[in-house]
Image (tube, grey):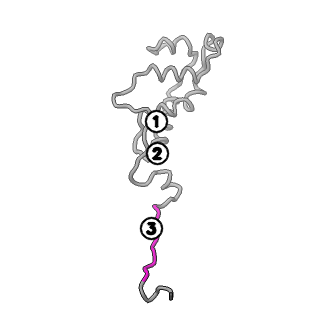
Amino acid sequence: PEQSDLSYVKGMVEVGGSPRAVQALILAAKARAALHGRNKPTPADIRSVALPSLRHRIVPSFHAAADSIKADHIIQEILKQVPRPSGDVEEAKPAKKGVRLLDFMLGARKPRRKKTPKVTPSSSPPL
């Protein structure tokens, strides 16, 4: 917390995330991107997995606990204060073309077109 440039973190966090926390955050973002059919994670993926990846790794300070501020609130405030890269979107869209990784892993195949029987004059029912 002392190394942070955000004054909010210095006052509200007793113990911050370790290098393993960053590894878990990156791995979770990569997994989310793969599940959505993308090859690489986006900043939106990182934001979406930040709470589940970090909430149990951040210990609020005594002052934060006295004000009933939980780790989730601290993480959300940090995410608000960190500047977003240019061109960043709120939510990354799943890949449209190709087979999504999750579908592929579960054995899903592309749907086949149903063949309709051809009607010929000799095969038509009598009137």
The residue furthest left is 86
Label 1 is placed on what type of residue?
A: Asp
Residue interval drawn in magenta: 110-119
Tag 2: amino acid:
His
- Residue sitting at 41 percent across and 47 percent down? 95
The CA distance from mark 2 to mark 3 is 25 Å
Counting residues from the N terminus, which is met first, the one under dot 2 or under dot 3? Answer: 2
Secondary structure category for the residue under label 2: loop
Q: Which mark is residue 45?
A: 1
Residue that numbered label 3 is attached to: 113
Instruction: Provide the residue designation for mark 2.
Output: 36
Report the residue at 42% width, 84% height from top. 120
Point 52% across, 59% down: residue: 107
Where disc 3 sits, the SS reads: loop
Q: Earlier in the sequence, mark 1 or mark 2?
A: 2
| Tag 1–tag 2 contact (CB < 8 Å) | yes
